[in-house]
């Protein structure tokens, strides 16, 4: 299945749709993003809609199955599509978090503890707080 994100006028993902791979293949059997976009525009009768293909298997610029990563991250509702980076960026989870320019994912200003315990981010203290050991 191929996945496509519908963007609003601010490049924010409104929804993600899946399309059978056969639908987006050209006459030579090669998948083409433009065919999928035209299919969705016709299907929903929205000729001016803005769609971008997204990869379910891409996260942080890595294809989890060893394939070619596509647009840094699989799009989700509320993600922003950044044209300059050609990337989908999730919503910022906390004000203090920083965008990793390579992965296009948000990171805490302090690394997650690596001691086998479970923590959650406390924005008030801007630190990891122990949830359970």
Image: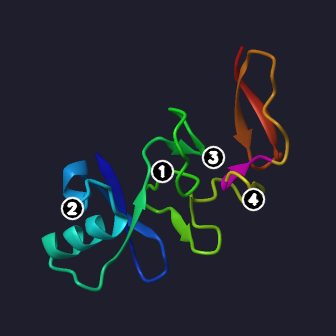
Chain part drawn in magenta: 104-108
Whether residue 36 is situated above or below residue 117 in the rendered picture: below
Marks 4 and 3, how far apart in space? 10 Å
Label 2 or label 3, whichever comes before in sequence order: 2
Q: In this view, does 98 lie to the left or right of 73?
A: right
- Picture quadrant of residue 59: top right
Residues packed near mark 4 inside 10 Å, few (<14), some (14 to 19) or many (20 plus):
few
User: Which residue is denoted by mark 1 in the rendering?
Assistant: 74
Reading the chain from its start, which is encountered first: label 4 or label 2? 2
Q: Which residue bears the numbered disc 4?
A: 101
Q: Which tag, 1 or 3, sits closer to the chain's start? A: 3
Of helix, strand and loop, which one carries label 2?
Answer: loop
Which residue is rendered at x = 19% and y = 57% of the image? 23
- Cα separation between marks 1 and 3: 9 Å
Give the percent coordinates (x, y) of residue 98: 77, 56
The image quadrant that residue 1 belongs to is: top left
Task: Count residues near mark 1 (Cα–Cα under 10 Å), then give few for <14, some for 14-19, many for 20+.
Answer: many
Instruction: Give me the C-alpha separation between circle 4 and circle 2.
Output: 37 Å
């Amino acid at each position: 299945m191929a996945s496509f994100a519908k963007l609003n006028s601010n490049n924010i993902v409104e929804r993600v749709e899946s399309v059978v791979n056969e639908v987006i293949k050209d006459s030579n059997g090669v998948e083409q993003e433009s065919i999928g976009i035209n299919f969705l525009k016709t299907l929903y009768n929205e000729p001016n809609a803005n769609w971008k293909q997204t990869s379910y298997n891409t996260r942080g610029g890595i294809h989890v199955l060893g394939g070619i990563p596509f647009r840094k991250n699989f799009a989700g509702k509320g993600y922003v599509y950044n044209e300059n980076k050609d990337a989908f960026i999730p919503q910022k989870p906390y004000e203090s978090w920083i965008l990793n320019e390579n992965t296009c994912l948000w990171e805490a200003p302090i690394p997650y503890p690596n001691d086998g315990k479970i923590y959650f981010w406390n924005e008030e203290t801007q630190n990891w707080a122990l949830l359970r050991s």
